[in-house]
């Protein structure tokens, strides 16, 4: 496995993301309240740039005019067609068994955020 330095851990606030080019792969690094996660910057639906999408929660069934979310800050939405993916594991919110985005191991080593690919 190759080790790739991405950034200083303080350079990315909770809820933010940054896109990196690692070799021929575009990767989005996302910081949640629980840590750092990295995934391929491409939606499996039609290749939309996930790193340009919003990060929020998964909408739950609710009453008209109410908006209830679970997994707040852990779901990224594709900006093209709003497909939803869990940033912690790359799984689709709607079809987690068959629709996934490739994820990468990320570790904080000292003050550095590194990706292993």
Image (tube, helix red, strand yellow):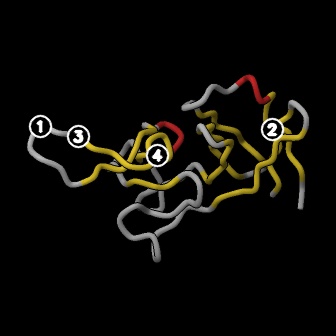
The one of 40 and 61 positioned closer to us in this rendering:
61
Label 4 or label 3, whichever lies nearer to me, is 3
Q: CA distance from mark 3 to mark 2?
A: 34 Å
Q: The C terminus lies in which quarter of the figure?
A: bottom right
Q: Please tell me how crowded label 3 is: few (under 14), some (14-19), or many (20+) other residues with Cα within 10 Å.
A: few
Position above or below: 36 against 43: above
Mark 3 in CB contact with mark 2 (< 8 angstroms):
no
Residue behind mark 3: 67
Q: Please tell me how crowded label 2 is: few (under 14), some (14-19), or many (20+) other residues with Cα within 10 Å.
A: many
Q: Position of residue 59 (x, y in %)?
A: 30, 49
Q: CA distance from mark 2 to mark 4?
A: 20 Å
Label 3: which secondary element: loop
Label 3 or label 2, whichever lies nearer to me, is 3
Residue behind mark 2: 113
Label 4 or label 1, whichever lies nearer to me, is 1
Q: Residue 95 appears in which quarter of the rendering?
A: bottom left
Q: Who comes first in sequence, dot 4 or dot 3? A: 3
Label 2 or label 1, whichever lies nearer to me, is 1
Residue behind mark 4: 76
Q: Please tell me how crowded label 4 is: few (under 14), some (14-19), or many (20+) other residues with Cα within 10 Å.
A: many
Q: Horizontal placement of 34 versus 4: left or right?
A: left
Position above or below: 88 against 54: below
- Find residue 74 and name its label: none
Residue at 40% in and 61% down: 93
Q: Position of residue 87 (x, y in %)?
A: 55, 51
Position above or below: 39 against 54: below
- Which residue appears farthest toward the bottom when viewing the image? 97
Q: Please tell me how crowded label 1 is: few (under 14), some (14-19), or many (20+) other residues with Cα within 10 Å.
A: few
Residue behind mark 1: 65
């Amino acid at each position: 496995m190759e080790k790739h330095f991405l950034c200083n851990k303080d350079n990315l606030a909770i809820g933010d993301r940054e896109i990196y080019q690692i070799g021929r792969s575009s990767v989005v690094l996302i910081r949640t309240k629980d840590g750092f996660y990295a995934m391929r910057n491409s939606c499996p639906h039609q290749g939309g740039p996930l790193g340009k999408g919003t990060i929020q929660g998964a909408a739950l069934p609710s009453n008209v005019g109410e908006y209830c979310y679970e997994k707040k800050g852990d779901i990224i939405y594709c900006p093209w067609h709003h497909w939803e993916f869990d940033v912690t594991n790359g799984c689709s919110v709607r079809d987690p068994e068959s629709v996934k985005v490739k994820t990468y191991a990320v570790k904080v080593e000292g003050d550095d955020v590194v990706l292993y690919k």
